[in-house]
Image (cartoon, rainbow, N blue to C red):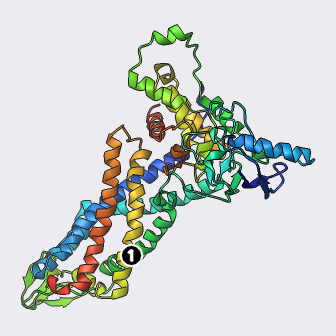
Amino acid sequence: MELRAQHGLLKSLVAKKILMALTGLFLCLFLVVHLSGNLQLLIPGYSGRLQFNSYAVFMTHFPLIKIISYVLYLSIIIHVLDALVLTIRNRRARTVDYAVKSGYGSTFASRNMGILGSLILIFLVLHLANFWYKYKFGEMPYMVSPEGHYVSQKGEAIPGAVLKEGHLWVDGVDKGPAMKDLYEVVRLAFGQSWIVAIYVLSMIPLGYHLAHGFQSGFQTLGLRFGKAFSVIRVAGWLFAIIIPLGFAIIPLVFYFFPEKLN
Amino acid sequence: MKVYLKVWRQRNAQDPGRFVDYTVDGINPDMSFLEMLDVLNNRLISQGEDPIAFDSDCREGICGTCGLYINGRPHGPLPRATTCQVHMRHFKDGETIVIEPWRAKAFPVIKDLVVDRSAFDRIIQAGGYISVNTGQAPDGNAIPIPKEDASKAFDAATCIGCGACVAACKNASAMLFVAAKVAHLGRLPQGRIEARERVLNMLSQMEKEGFGGCTNTGACEAECPKGISLENIAFLNREFIKAKISF
């Protein structure tokens, strides 16, 4: 048999689908890290605020994390564009649609990954504008210790420091950059009912997207061996419930039980 | 019993086609679905009308020729059955039944409910075979094959190429069909020699024919009259990855 297929590495549908799986599963891994990081928001008091803001400094300054964050941005873009290309190709495969459709044998999520993904993307843009863009480029409040001193990026309260262009100065000496108070931005955002509603409701499409996507990723990569796949399937369902629920809890606690965080 | 049919009628590939309503009365519940259509066609012929064109051959569920999309499902409401295995007792008296042809760009309608499935033949020609002479049955039996591999290869080999997977798939993908053949041959030592060429050639041909890609919805597996598992698509994906990383 002669090899007649003249495909580039990413030309074929299966290769494109494998790219979807790889980026998708990487994003699943990111969700775990992101959720565990964000759950620090629920630590009450000044120590919680300090821990979360220190974590934000670490996530934006540690070189390895910076590299991973660029891989993450790239993964999101690839996942979206690849999905778009695949959806267009797949739509073209059926030019005349059925009059009656049953959807038998497939889940709601599996048939609507594009719509669910689009909803997640809209949420993502809003989410990045709310926090990521603000933290990196916008006007930010700065961290102040209970004694009323500004706090350095290392988390030390510096008595008598004056804030000038993001740096702390004591008697004309630069003591380094001040710690931005991302926690405060989160607290203010999650005090608004419409933001809380959007954040909580957006976790529903995320859950459905994960319910199909998690196990589908393994299937696409060919990682399906007998009974082990049932474990992956159950893990996928648990993942699709636990992760969105974990994220949804944060705005709900901030909105309904702010006193618990003091 | 009496049923109301909405049947897709299309004179030829150029005709845009339309649904036509028919009422069929005096149906014996033990008639097969195709026999019910035969009754209707006899009536149409005696009335001087054009009978409804549909494919069928063995009428015992092994040839894969018949294939009607009945009430939103390929091969109708019965699990693991072809259209010819569906009987009128599986429908309610007075039910409205919508009958459509397989819908896929790669399966153009020839007439009414008959579609051209030669795209499947060309996919098989692209790599769904073994080039070497594997001899007679005794020669085959001389090669020891682990029971699990033999069983899985046989399960995949039960594909009858009816195209229900394509019809059921929201992407009109032929992945289950291709996967069945790739897994059938790829799980056996005789088929391993050309495994790389096979998976790449067959997938390439599948795309050339205009079938869509797999999104793992599982509709194909659920509608396949032979119960070909999605596990075969995972096998195909592994074969593809292996083929791409080996030169």
Q: Is residue B207 left or right of residue A151?
A: right
Q: Which residue is mark 1?
A: A201
* Name of the residue lying farthest toward the right: B48
Which residue occupies 66% across, 40% down?
A: B30
In which quadrant of the rendered view does residue B162 lie? Answer: top right
Q: Position of residue A134 (x, y in %)?
A: 33, 81
Q: Is residue A60 left or right of residue B29?
A: left
Tell me if residue B242 can be seen.
yes
Which residue occupies 32% across, 88% down?
A: A192
Which residue occupies 63% across, 38% down?
A: B85
State the count of labels: 1
Q: Is residue B170 left or right of residue A254?
A: right
Q: Is residue A56 above or below residue B127?
A: below
Q: Position of residue B173 (x, y in %)?
A: 59, 47
Chain of the residue on which disc 1 is drawn: A
Q: Is residue B166 above or below residue B92?
A: above
Q: Position of residue A251 (x, y in %)?
A: 28, 79
Q: Is residue A117 above or below residue B54?
A: below
Helix, strand or loop for disc 1: helix
Name the amino acid, label 1.
Answer: Leu
Q: Is residue B68 above or below residue A241?
A: above
Tell me if residue A173 can be seen.
no
Q: Residues within 10 Å of mark 1 (few under 14, many from 20)?
A: some
Q: Position of residue B23 (x, y in %)?
A: 78, 55
| In-front residue for pair B150/A122 | B150
| In-front residue for pair B13/A187 | B13
Which residue occupies 29% across, 69% down?
A: A245
In which quadrant of the rendered view does residue A12 lie? Answer: top right
